[in-house]
Image: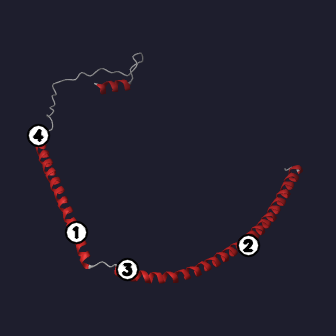
Amino acid sequence: MESPKATTILNEILQKLSKLTKEDELAQGIKEEVIAENLSEQVKEDNQEAKQELSEEVKQEASEESELSEESTEVEAEETQLMEGYVKTEEFEQKISSLEAKMAELMKKVDEDLGVAYKDKKMMSEQIEKLSAEPAAEAIKHSPETEVNKANVSFRNPNRPISTLDRVLERISK
């Protein structure tokens, strides 16, 4: 049922598609080669940079070691000076006793503040007891004798006939 014209058109389309896919594959192969070359160049550059950084670090470490040897002689001189600056037991005991006195003063202040707070709490509890002894409000009594007049509310249209729903709603509202 297919016409020869339709089959020739389909064959042409398939040939063009196959050519395109072959070209795409070739292009991808070329791209992969270019990417691989770029990566290898980048790796080489990174290696060179890392070597330069390592050589710089080695140079810095060598200079630091020479500085450390000079500093070690300075540290030994400082240690002899520190030996002279130790705290004596008498000074230490004086400072401890002054700190203990300050701590005692602070404890007295805290005790006074707690005493005031305890008194306030006691006064508040007494007031609560007095207020709780009194009734909160007068009791409300129900009196069934009084009748409440309900307003006759009708939601239906007076021009239409009464339906079953209208009758039910009328009884409920009474």
Residue 162 x/y as whole percent: 38, 20
- The residue sitting at 71% across, 72% down in the picture is 45
- The residue sitting at 14% across, 49% down in the picture is 125
Q: Dot 2: what SS?
A: helix
What residue is disc 4 on? 134
What residue is disc 2 on? 40
**Closer to the camera in the image, 10 or 77:** 77
- Closest to the camera, between mark 2 and mark 4, is 2
Q: CA distance from mark 3 to mark 1?
A: 25 Å
**Closer to the camera in the image, 23 or 1:** 23
First reached walking from the N terminus: tag 3 or tag 1: 3
First reached walking from the N terminus: tag 2 or tag 1: 2
What residue is disc 1 on? 98
Residue type for callout 4: Glu
The reply to whether callout 2 and callout 4 are in contact (CB within 8 Å) is no
Residue 42 x/y as whole percent: 71, 70
